[in-house]
Amino acid sequence: MSSIQAPRIPVIDFSKKILNPGTSSWDFTCKKVMHALESYGCFVAIYEQVSLEVYNSLFHKLEELFNLSLETKRKNVSDIPYFGYVGNQPFIPSLYEGLGIKDAVTLEGTRAFTNTLWPNGNDDFCEIVHPYTKLVAELEQMVKRMVFEGYGVQSYECLQEWTTYLFRMMKYRAAGKDEDDIGCDVHTDKSFITILHQNEVSGLEIKTKDGQWLCFEPSPSSFIVIAGDALLAWSNNRIHAPLHRVVMKGSEARYSVGLFSYQKKMIEVPQELIDEHHPLQFKPFDNFGLLHYFNTEEGHRQESTVKAYCGI
């Protein structure tokens, strides 16, 4: 009698050199992406375009970044929730701290960040982070284009024109003897798409639709792509936005980076995704308004932030 195999996060290879729209490899990958996002809300992307050398350089720079004084790190401020420094606050798990670079895909955005934290700037940091974010943004754009093609929606170029990216750099220190091991509480992202990359210290867990927690096993070429609440609403609830958390069980610090895509204009469900079997479920909404709502006491209480914010 065969045993039932436990579910795993789907793995999709994006490292093929010929992965262009209209090719058989693109179509094959597109089908796998659609199935993964609808069934799990996430998948592991094997993406070797980010070299091992860049990977090592990036995470070395993260260690330098988090070794800066707390006073310096707190200069990373933003009027958008979670876009600036977060950490050392009573409502945030004590193991976590993170910093954010707005518009990191642009050199200007990365330089603005380094000029804030380092009096004379930091060219070495910019020369690693800026090319890295551009490569990861290319993966995000491929995934987004596949979603649009998979649903037969024609407005990809228009939506991409209004896309902006946040690059968050995160550290989770190991839990002490009498500390809670939660590095990040259970949540869904409010982004359109999130792409996470980390050092080889495990901790990220994704919750399946039937309530099982799946562990992400990291490697230098493994990126985890996660659908945010904004994509769930845009898809008229076809795509799943999964709950996830970070649990720190080992003795090493976990360093992680995330590229979060947001929309700068109102998001509406495309007409192609509305029919008699799929009636409209969401009103037009502002992506940053959703993020601000999540940052309120009422927003935090909701089982589904996006449904409470703009659901019909």
Image: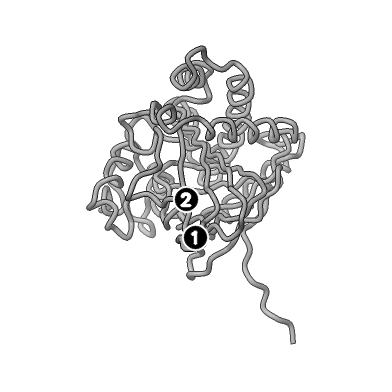
Query: Mark 2 or mark 1: which comes first in sequence?
Result: 2
User: Which amino acid type is shown beneath numbered disc 2?
Assistant: Leu
| Pointer 1 residue | 181
Indicate the amino acid at tag 1. Asp
Total count of labels: 2
Residue in the picture at 57% in, 51% down: 34
Q: Residue at x 40, y 42 (%)?
A: 87
CA–CA distance between discs 2 and 1? 8 Å
Q: Pointer 1: residues within 10 angstroms few (<14), some, or many (20+)? A: many
Q: Is residue 103 above or below residue 14?
A: above
- On the image, the x and y values in percent for residue 175 come to 52, 56
| Residue lying at the far bottom of the rendered structure | 1
Q: Report x, y in % for residue 52.
A: 75, 35
State the mark number for residue 21.
none
Indicate whether 179 appears above or below 124. Answer: below
Q: Residues within 10 Å of mark 2 (few under 14, many from 20)?
A: many
Residue plotted at (49% across, 60% down): 181
Q: In the figure, is residue 170 to the left or right of 9?
A: left
Q: Is residue 19 above or below residue 188?
A: above
Which residue is labeled 2 in the image?
95
Residue 13 coordinates in the image, percent (x, y): 71, 46
**Quadrant where the N terminus lies?**
bottom right
Determine the residue positioned at 51% across, 21% down: 110
